[in-house]
Amino acid sequence: MNAEYNPDFDPTGIEGGVDTNALPWVSMACAPNWQFKPLRASKESGMFSAIVKIEKGVNTNNVLHLGAMDLLILSGQLSYPDGPLTSTVGPGVWGYIPANARVAGLNAIEDTEFLANFFGPVAFLSEGGEVLSILTAMDLQQAANAQGITLVPNTLAECMQPRPASAITESSPLAISTKSAGVLVDESAAASDFVHPHFVDTRAVPWIVDPTLPDIGLKVLRVSEETGVTSLIVRHNGVAGPHYHLGAADFLVLNGHIGYRAGPPEGYGPGVWFYEPAGARHEATQRVGEDEDLIYTANVYGPVQFDDGPGTPIAAVQSWMQYKEAAKAFGLKLVSNQFESDKTLLAWAPVGSAN
């Protein structure tokens, strides 16, 4: 019963984060010239998460996103030469590509690494539009299995399973591993004048600080009124009190160390990615140490319920509605959820067709 929605849930198994610096790069034939550090794959929803690497000079033409994708550029530069995404994006830029978007081209100007959440499969097409291969969550799962990589659990029940012994024989630290990645998103760094409906330079987004919670800062990037998903950058120097994740959430630590239930005493540091399954409970989540800001990315897939401890009344519920109101109050322009008047979607008619 511990695997159910339960205030006494106390995981003893695989719950926690994965240090992306300790993972190898994995290649898959279905995603030519892309390399992956596999993080999570859902058999239920088809969503999967990974750090992706594309080496300098690699050009990927005609990519069809059957599901949406969000990404944060960690290092390097990518160029989208055509269509609604036309731009050059570099470190600290966060973006969202809606489902059914056909991307004409994606070029790596430099060796580029980025955090990516794929909400569904990606199809790689020929110049004529025929499907050459499809990348899915199960491809990522199989690639992880072949390399002995244990993916982060998807549910509370999976968190209770014993952690398998690691079979990883090599590791490849991220390009940003030798320096603080907090500079990617901190407004104290020099922000560009980059403006785009589907990408945002996170350094140019101001921190939203509630006077009643001065140790917590938020950069709201995207809010979906359809799904309730909110994407954020969080500066977390205080303590988040007792709470339930009524919806799941995922995080990548960019700066400092975070401490929470089932984690090591020293906390999780830069490069650690973790996933909170729906129903996860924390009596406290806080920064470990006093010398550095704790900064992390966050995709919040549903409400967070706060209280004063097990069995106490609900004190507050934080959802997409509060995040959207905060963004509006601070005059933030959020990343767009869909392409306007797009002609590149999946359901296109061949040239000359009467249909």
Image: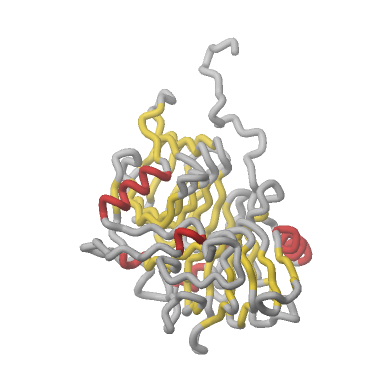
- Which of 76 and 322 lies nearest the eye of the viewer? 322
Residue 54 lies, in percent from the top left, at 35, 51
Whether residue 355 is visible, yes or no, is yes
Residue 284 lies, in percent from the top left, at 59, 79
Query: Farthest residue toward the bottom?
Result: 290
**Residue 58's image quarter?**
top left
Residue 77 lies, in percent from the top left, at 42, 55
From the viewer's perspective, is residue 130 above or below residue 118?
A: above
Q: Is residue 132 left or right of residue 202?
A: left
- Which of 82 and 287 lies nearest the eye of the viewer? 287
Q: Residue at x 66, y 33 (%)?
A: 341
Q: Residue at x 71, y 65 (%)?
A: 318
Whether residue 193 is visible, yes or no, is no
From the viewer's perspective, is residue 224 above or below residue 233?
A: above
Q: Is residue 110 left or right of residue 184?
A: left
Q: Residue at x 54, y 29 (%)?
A: 346
Residue 83 lies, in percent from the top left, at 54, 37
Query: How does the figure colour the protein chain or chains?
Result: secondary structure
In the picture, which quadrant includes the N terminus? bottom right
Query: Farthest residue toward the top?
Result: 354
In the picture, which quadrant includes the C terminus? top right
Q: Residue at x 40, y 35 (%)?
A: 134
